[in-house]
Image: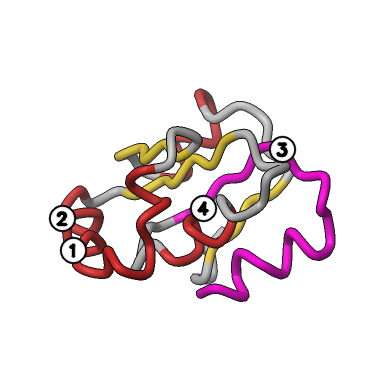
Amino acid sequence: MVLTGALPLAHLPQARRAAVIGIGTGLTTHTLLASHAIERVDTIEIEPAMAEAARRFAGRNAAAFADPRSNIVFEDAKTHFSGRGGRYDVIVSSRRIPG
C-alpha cells in the first residue's frame, strides 16, 4: 500500500491533487501526504465502517486522519468522479475498477 502511493509520486513529483479510491488501511493516503508538493488528498470510501477500522492502524497512517490536506469522502467513487470530484493529478486504487 505504501508503493501504491509512492510510485505515482515518483512518476509525477509535482502532483498537487490526488485521489485514493478506498481507504483500506490508510497507508496509501498517508504516503501521498508525505509529499510536500501535495496540496490535497481526497480518499473516496463508500463504507464509513472501513474508515473507522483504518483508525486501528494509527501508528502507521496518522496523516490520513490528522493532516489538514486529507479529506475523506463517503460516497461511491463512480458518483464522486462523475460530478463533484474535480480534477486530480493522481488517482490511485489498489483494486481493479470494473467498466
Q: CA distance from mark 1 to mark 4?
A: 17 Å
Q: Earlier in the sequence, mark 1 or mark 3?
A: 3
Q: CA distance from mark 2 to mark 3?
A: 28 Å
Tags 1 and 2 touching, CB below 8 Å: yes
Query: Please, what secondary structure does the residue beneath circle 2 have?
Result: helix
Q: Residue at x 30, y 48 (%)?
A: 46
Tags 1 and 4 touching, CB below 8 Å: no
Tags 4 and 3 touching, CB below 8 Å: no
Q: Looking at the rendered structure, which numbered label has been put on residue 49?
A: 2
Along the viewing direction, whichever of 36 and 6 lies nearer the viewer: 36
Q: Which circle, 4 or 3, is nearer the viewer?
A: 3
Q: Earlier in the sequence, mark 4 or mark 2?
A: 4
Circle 1 Cα neighbour tier, 10 Å, few/some/many (<14 / 14–19 / ≥20): few
Tags 1 and 3 touching, CB below 8 Å: no
Q: Earlier in the sequence, mark 2 or mark 3?
A: 3
On the image, the x and y values in percent for residue 93 come to 54, 63
Indicate the amino acid at tag 3.
Arg
The quadrant the C terminus occupies is: bottom right
